[in-house]
Amino acid sequence: MPPTAAARTPRAALAELLAGNRRFVSGQPVHGHDVTAAAAVASGDQQPYAVLLGCIDSRVPLEAIFDQTFGSICVIRTGAHVLDRAVCGSIEYVVGQLGVRLVMVLGHERCGAVGSAVEALRSGRLPEGSLRYVVDRIAPAVHEVGADDPDAHPLAIRRHVRRTVATLRADDLLAGPVGAGEVAVVGALYDLATGEVALLPEE
Ligand SMILES: [Zn+2]
């Protein structure tokens, strides 16, 4: 059975995703080896069951770490999963038009983008160009944990995931289905050392 057929509730979609991560961690992926044009063609019409928002980090390819096949998940990646209107609109599309029930925000340990924001706020030297936009979006999380805290980097990574989740839950088009329990927005963290994805507990 394709995962899409079994994952039409937020809870089932989350279980499907985490099962895929366990296959990845155990070195027994079902789909990981099948990165071929034939597999892409076989996916036919897309019927994704989750949308993942992750970081651009080259060590965190989302389809691979969740052992997902073509057509099963939608993936959006920006530096430190920073939101902008295009990202929010894309998630609104996936939820509203494709019927996806699960949105996962995935941060990761040693995130360079969050590290850059911590460094910029400590030094007072803010970057120029559009990178400034990215740092500005991460800055509230750094301020909340305290830029001078020795653990500001790992703490801000977690705080920034939680803030991103909260923003999406309050999104104009997502708040309704989230409030009704039809759609879930969850935050999680990827461990570069083990390959494991752990849900961030609700506060
Ligand atoms: Zn990152």
Image (cartoon, helix red, strand yellow):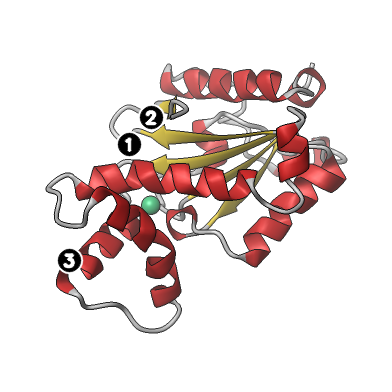
Category of crowding for the residue at label 1, using alpha-carbon neighbours closer than 10 angstroms: few (below 14), some (14–19), many (at least 20): some
Which amino acid lies under the numbered mark 2 shown in the image of this protein? Gly
Q: Secondary structure at mark 1?
A: loop
**Discs 3/2, front:** 3
Mark 2 = which residue? 195
Q: Relative to 45, is 172 above or below?
A: below
Query: How many numbered tags mark residues here?
Result: 3
Closest to the observer, 32 or 182: 182
| Nearer-N-terminus badge (3/2) | 3
For the residue with label 2, is its CB less than 8 Å from the closest atom of ligand 1?
A: no
Name the residue at 31% across, 78% down: 127
| Residue 143 at x, y percent in the picture | 29, 57
Which amino acid lies under the numbered mark 3 shown in the image of this protein? Arg
What numbered label is drawn on residue 192?
A: 1
| Nearer-N-terminus badge (3/1) | 3
Q: Secondary structure at mark 3?
A: helix
Q: Relative to 59, is 185 above or below?
A: above
Estimate the spatial distance between the alpha carbons at disc 3 and disc 1, rounded to whole Å: 25 Å
Q: Secondary structure at mark 2?
A: loop
For the residue with label 1, is its CB less than 8 Å from the closest atom of ligand 1?
A: no
| Residue 71 at x, y percent in the picture | 75, 38
Residue 163 appears left or right of 117: right
Which amino acid lies under the numbered mark 1 shown in the image of this protein? Leu
Residue 110, visible in the rendered structure: no
Quarter holding the C terminus is: top left
| Residue 115 at x, y percent in the picture | 26, 57
Mark 3 = which residue? 122
